[in-house]
Amino acid sequence: MEDTFDKMQSQIDRLTETISSIMKFSQSSTVSRERINLNQIAQDVLLWMRPLSKYIPVDLIIDSNEIILSVDRIQISQVLVNLLKNAIEATELLPSDQQKNVELKIFINGNEAVCEVTNYHSYISPNDISELFHPFVSSKKGNTGIGLSIVKQIVEMHQGSIDVKSDQEKTVFTVKLPLYSQSN
């Protein structure tokens, strides 16, 4: 009887998490923009995520002293947290003899800030890549599959783009966001 109750409670918890994610996804259509330095957001996110990444090093590679954007600080932080968390979780699954680190590289390309989150030896097939940003699609057991949908929505609300490339060597998620200008 107790085992049945535990299973029911687990399903209720999962359903509650799913409903919460759906509500967050549907309500996240407002952007409260402020002028921020993307490098500082990245450093803050890495500091916050340190306990999660204690066994998987995350290398921050910054190409410029300041990369100024006009964005919602919380939403862009959420993008980085989600992408880094996914990369760390994928890396944790690797055999012990493989390279276990994640890179967050931030640089300017033309009039865009570029964030690349890279993890090694975690191949995503082209079929899976085409489904990655759809809501409720996940290869992780017990996952709602809404994280990358929210990431894509946030990036697009900021007039940016997100792309993923994967081969046997590495998987790279690339986010591009417009740099701050007086007209933003």
Image: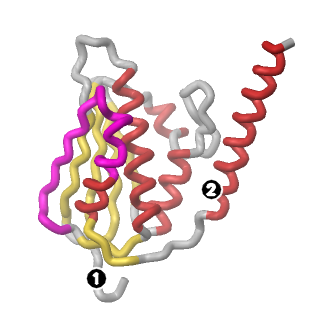
**Mark 1 or mark 2, which is nearer to you?**
2
Which residue carries the number 1 mark?
Answer: 181
Q: Which mark is residue 58?
A: none
Disc 1 to disc 2: CB gap under 8 Å: no
Reply above or below: 9 against 111.
above
Q: Position of residue 12 (x, y in %)?
A: 77, 34
Residue 154 lies left or right of residue 94; in this view the side is right
User: Colour scheme used in the picture?
Assistant: secondary structure
Query: Residue 56 lies in magenta, yes or no?
Result: yes
Reply above or below: 26 against 87.
below
Q: Looking at the image, tell me whether mark 1 or mark 2 is earlier in sequence order.
A: 2
Q: Where is residue 20 in the image (x, y as percent from the top left)?
A: 68, 49
- The range drawn in magenta is 45-66
Q: What element carries label 2?
A: helix
Q: How crowded is mark 1: few (under 14 residues within 10 Å), some or many (20 or more)?
A: few
Which residue carries the number 2 mark?
Answer: 25
Residue at 16% x, 54% y: name it: 62
- Label 2 sits on what residue type? Phe
State the residue lying farthest toward the bottom: 182
For the C terminus, the quadrant is: bottom left
Residue at 17% x, 68% y: name it: 66
State the residue lying farthest toward the right: 1
For the N terminus, the quadrant is: top right
Query: Residue 11 lies in magenta, yes or no?
Result: no
- For the residue pair 61 and 8, the one nearer the viewer reads as 8
Residue at 55% x, 49% y: name it: 149
Residue at 44% x, 32% y: name it: 126
- Label 1 sits on what residue type? Ser
Q: What element carries label 1?
A: loop
Question: How far, Cα to Cα, is label 1 from label 2?
Answer: 28 Å
